[in-house]
Amino acid sequence: MSATIFALSTPPGISAVSIIRISGPDTFRAVGRLLGLKKPCKMVFSQLRKVHLRKIFSIEGRLLDEGLVILFKKGRSFTGEDMAELQLHGSHIVIKTVLESLTSLGYARLAKPGEFTKKALENNRLSISEVEGLSDLLVAETEAQQEQALNIYSGSLSKKINSWKERTTKILSSVEAAIDFSDEVNSDSLVNGVIHDLKILETELVEEKEGFKSAESIRGGFEVALVGKPNVGKSTLLNGLAKRKLAITSEITGTTRDIIELRYNLDGLPVTFLDTAGVRHTDDEVEKIGVSNSIDRVNNSDVRVFLTNDKEEIRSFGVKYVKSDIVLRPKGDLPGSEPSISGKTGKGFEVLLETLKKTFSDKVRKASNITRTRHLEKIISCLDHLRTIRVYMEEKNYEDEIIAEELRTILRNFDGLLGVVNTEEILGEIFNSFCIGK
């Protein structure tokens, strides 16, 4: 039997209102005890899903608070089970005593992280894609992340996968018909039709694969690495962008050894600026590690901003110059060539941020629906099998049974994307990021 669980669903701390959620077969029984009812099964509520103002008592009958109580019947709640929400005053002691009262009942327990959402999934109130979208929405910091999360939560990815699955099933049906009724099926017509349909499906999957990096960057934030030799003003620039002192600045070279990050909302776009260790040859072992880590992170960044007076100097940093790189003369408050930037005065900030905004806005437009590594792995696997089928059929060197099995493998990958298989493994990864009351 499903457990009856409860948890504080709002952030802990003093507030006007705090919400406690309860879900499971003994929900109404537990709420009845908190309301001091002698016959919990015959509660005095006129209707479910209505708001009722009630006094809340401990199991011993001591008044704890007065708040709003909402009951939801099984099948018409977020979790799909009997469920209740208690909207109470946001006092530490109120929440503490109410939670203790629920614990003392003996038939309800504190929820685990994400357990309410897990119940919703198990009761078919949410799909695995919707759960992933909800997970991302809970931690979204910018409008772009919010839009991406809601797009997934609304079921757009599930609909797309189901469309791919439906068309693959149709192709498989044609191939299986050729196996069962080989004398009646025109093989040339079958091959041409299957190849045509596979190419369309392959094109769509390639688009998803190519847009993954941008989608992943939206979800985690676009990374902008500040790169240069020691003492060129990287830390001063980071502090200027943050409008506070994040990084230590000093005339002593090699001050920055660990990568310092600044989360930045660039007009709705999530950006993480990285203050990296100054690139130079050094005998200091700790600084060597810092420089090595910085170069690795720089090579994986979405955009690198090189602070240097000489573009040719970039080669000595151990990285290859690419089109998206930005080169600026550091310490732009002093006379010299342009373009330049100054962390001290803010000169060049507006131009830099506008350039980054345009670059990342273009990436957002190209972003795909897949946002997680597990999505990408399944898409790549599907593409591998699609190409295998196409090569076999174009060379006319195949057996229908082999093609059918390749198509079934593709369908299993689509099921994996939908969470039909390996659900527990997927859920473990997702729910690790959930709060207890969700």
Image (spheres, rainbow, N blue to C red):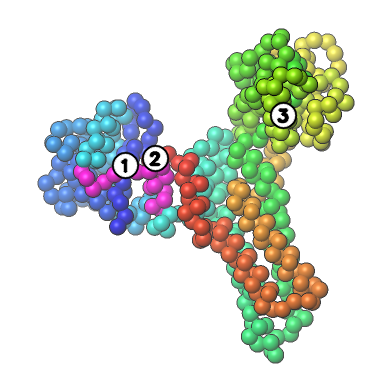
Name above or below for residue 319 compared with residue 3. Answer: above
Disc 1 to disc 3: CB gap under 8 Å: no
x and y, in percent, of residue 257 in the image:
66, 21
Residue 355 visible to the viewer: no
Q: CA distance from mark 2 to mark 1?
A: 9 Å
Q: Nearer the viewer, residue 101 or 62?
A: 101
| Earlier-in-chain disc, 2 versus 1 | 1
Q: Secondary structure at mark 1?
A: strand
Q: Which residues are magenta?
A: 105-120
> In the picture, which quadrant includes the N terminus?
bottom left
Q: How many residues crowd around disc 3 within 10 Å: few (fewer than 14), some, or many (20 or more)?
A: some
Residue at the image position 57 percent from the left and 35 percent from the top: 142
Is 218 drawn above or below residue 342 in the view shown? below
SS at mark 3? helix
Q: CA distance from mark 2 to mark 3?
A: 38 Å
Residue at the spot x=81%, y=73% of the render?
395
Residue 365 sits in quarter: top right
- The first of marks 2 and 3 along the sequence is 3
Q: Assign the C terminus to one quadrant of the image.
A: top left
Eyeballing the image, is 54 above or below 255?
Answer: below
Tell whether 73 sits left or right of 320: left
Q: Which mark is residue 436?
A: 2
- Tag shown at residue 110: 1
In three-dimensional space, the C-alpha distance between marks 1 and 3, rounded to whole angstroms, equals: 45 Å
Is residue 435 visible to the viewer in this orientation of the structure? yes
**Residue type marked 1:** Leu
Q: Looking at the image, is mark 1 or mark 3 nearer the viewer?
A: 3
Identify the residue position indicated by label 3 in the image: 292
